[in-house]
Image: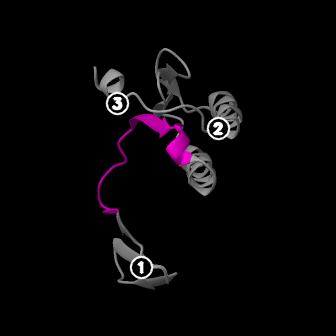
Amino acid sequence: MTSTGTGPWEISRSQKGYFVHHFAPSDLPRIPKNVDFVIDRSDSMHGRKMEQTREALLKILVDLAEDDHFGLITFDYSVSAWKKELLPANQQNLEAAKSFARHIHDKGGTNITYLLT
């Protein structure tokens, strides 16, 4: 990847035509986050897509701060929440979430009508 720009923003580009734009003003206080990660585990995620999703989730979980709260939701033909409520991003919860994430595998189809209701 190559990087362009300086200051509070940065654009990273890969050789494959993808890019990421990071924008983080340094003069603002950090705000705690409430995040629900929604992961497609249907057959369409078979192979590399699921591997990339797991890898990304594991990396993002590490970046959460202790005052953040998070949840994990998976779906295929049905929806399943890892826990019933958002949890604080403490070490114990993050380790449990990473263990759960490592065992997410593709299975089943997607009933989009059920998911949207």
- In the image, the segment drawn in magenta is 24-45
Q: Are marks 3 and 1 in contact (CB under 8 Å)?
A: no
For image coordinates 38% across by 75% down, the residue present is 10
In the rendering, at what x and y percent does residue 41 appear? 54, 37
Q: Which residue is mark 2?
A: 105
For image coordinates 34% across by 77% down, the residue present is 7
Is residue 71 positioned above or below 24 on the image? Answer: above
Disc nearest the viewer among 1 and 2:
2
Q: Are marks 1 and 2 in contact (CB under 8 Å)?
A: no
Dot 1 crowding, Cα within 10 Å, few <14, some 14–19, many 20+: few
Name the N-terminal-most of marks 1 and 2: 1
For the C terminus, give its image quadrant: top left
Question: Taking the image as drawn, is residue 24 in sight?
Answer: yes
In the rendering, at what x and y percent does residue 77 appear? 47, 26
Q: Which residue is mark 1?
A: 17
Disc nearest the viewer among 3 and 1:
3
Q: Are marks 3 and 2 in contact (CB under 8 Å)?
A: no
For the residue pair 114 and 70, the one nearer the viewer reads as 114
Residue 32 is marked as: none
For the residue pair 35 and 68, the one nearer the viewer reads as 35
What amino acid is labelled 1 in the image? Gly
Question: Taking the image as drawn, is residue 64 in sight?
Answer: no
What amino acid is labelled 3 in the image? Ile
Is residue 27 positioned above or below 42 on the image? Answer: below
Q: Which residue is mark 3?
A: 112
What amino acid is labelled 2 in the image? His
Disc nearest the viewer among 3 and 2:
3
Q: Secondary structure at mark 3?
A: helix
For image coordinates 48% across by 39% down, the residue present is 40
